[in-house]
Image (cartoon, coloured by chain):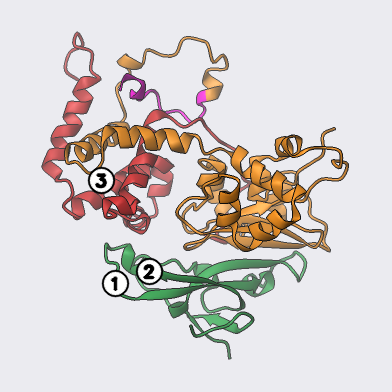
Chain colours: A orange, B red, C green
Amino acid sequence: MSHDHPHHHDHDHDHDHPDPHAPRKDLEDTPPTYHQALADAVAELLIEKGVFTGGDLRNTIEYMQGRTPELGAKITARAWVDPAFKAKLLTNAKEAAAEIGIDTGPAPLLVMENTPDVHNVIVCTLCSCYPVFLLGKSPDWYKSREYRSRVVRDPRTVLSEFGTDIAPQREVRVHDSTADMRYMILPMRPEGTDGMDETQLAQLVTRDSLIGVIEVSAPA
Amino acid sequence: MGGLDAGPVARTEHTFEPWENKTDAIVRLLSNPKSGPLMRIDELRRGIEDMGPGIYDELTYYERWIASVANVLIEKGVIHVDELGRKLEEVKARHTPASSPEH
Amino acid sequence: MRFSVGDEVRVRWATPPGHVRTPYYCRGLSGRIERICGQFHNPEELAYGRTGDTVVTLYRVRFQQKTLWPDYTGPEKDTVDIEVFEHWLETAQ
């Protein structure tokens, strides 16, 4: 599994390598950090003990890498064009998503609809629960102390840091994902998109709008 | 951590590294009912909390995960300290170029 | 199931050691049952490798921001919905 060799552990990875085709640091010469080695060691012991196979591990990594915000965007666009689908999505998200071939994962999923009266935003103050099956792995900021501690106490200021100003007549509703539910926001369809088809609409939907920190805008 | 004082949200993200994806997959496989489940997400979280509040500043997200996984699996007798110690040395040795002196 | 949608409930004040899923910031405070999420194994047991024989009802409780944070400066109508297990809830006085 040479492609699995750990490399340098830098969260600004992309900034260090602005050119994706530039030669990378010689991976073979970079000793793994303690935790990188621990991941390899634990994985190998579990494979040796028959808990899972190397194939299970590779398949799971690949499957999870295929979980991207495009899935949440696809669900959103369908809800915007199909009222029956939307109604089902808001009452039984798992079944609705399954109808269009999307697996929402093992945890129950609740979809919260943004309306002219309510703006919803999600957080997990206890750990970092996130709808990973629909949006992929969560961004670092979602897991940060700053986001988790402040969005439940001062959501309007946090939203404004994302460039989202919610009118005072709209309720801001924070969903703290503390236990067994996972959440996704159904953003409002922007004005001026009447002529767009489902595929075009899906392209407008960003990950952050499905977390609820921004709204979806019409193309300029 | 809800409600504690903190500064502005820095909108950071990074591309996940292979070992982070691997750690994520290990947790998903262990918490899958097909494996028992051998280790539930609740045990993972508790394992992180057991490391103390300072761990949030000392380790990154997936570093906390793999550290907790190792501790919980040891606690449950799924893996043993001695075999993990030996395996860690084996992994490290694999990454040490043959020509370079020991440490 | 002890509570119904719309009931006013109070989160018990308690600070046990160990793993709990009830955020500190809502303990001792009142809100209304927004929905019943279903029944789940108690995470306070699961966290220690025990499943237990019983399941616990999980609710979503809606709190007014002003209840959670008396110094909240945003509109009165702003809320936080939090998942809380039944054994942490009591009828609000």
**Foreground residue, A91 or B27?**
A91
Q: Secondary structure at mark 2?
A: strand
Q: Determine whether, in the image, residue A28 is placed left or right of residue A108.
A: left
In which chain is the residue bearing label 2?
C
The spot of residue B102 in percent (x, y) is: 16, 17
In which chain is the residue bearing label 1?
C
The answer to whether the residue labelled 1 contacts the one labelled 2, judged by CB atoms less than 8 Å apart, is: yes
Q: Which residue is mark 3?
A: B70
Q: Amino acid at mark 2?
A: His
Query: Which image quarter holds the C terminus of chain A?
Result: top right
Q: Secondary structure at mark 1?
A: loop
Query: Which image quarter holds the N terminus of chain A?
Result: top left
* Magenta residue check for A9: yes
The answer to whether the residue labelled 1 contacts the one labelled 3, judged by CB atoms less than 8 Å apart, is: no
Q: Residues within 10 Å of mark 3 (few under 14, many from 20)?
A: many
Q: Which residue is mark 2?
A: C41
The magenta-colored residue range is A1-13
Of callouts 1 and 2, the N-terminal one: 2
The spot of residue C79 in percent (x, y) is: 68, 68
Residue at mark 1 to residue at mark 2: CA–CA distance:
7 Å
Residue located farthest toward the left when viewing the structure as drawn: B82
Q: Amino acid at mark 3?
A: Ala
In which chain is the residue bearing label 3?
B
Residue A35 showing in the rendered view: no
**Foreground residue, A108 or A100?**
A100
The spot of residue B77 in percent (x, y) is: 16, 52
Residue located farthest toward the bottom when viewing the structure as drawn: C93
Q: Which residue is mark 1?
A: C52
Residue at mark 1 to residue at mark 3: CA–CA distance:
24 Å
Residue at 56%, 14% in the rendered image: A19
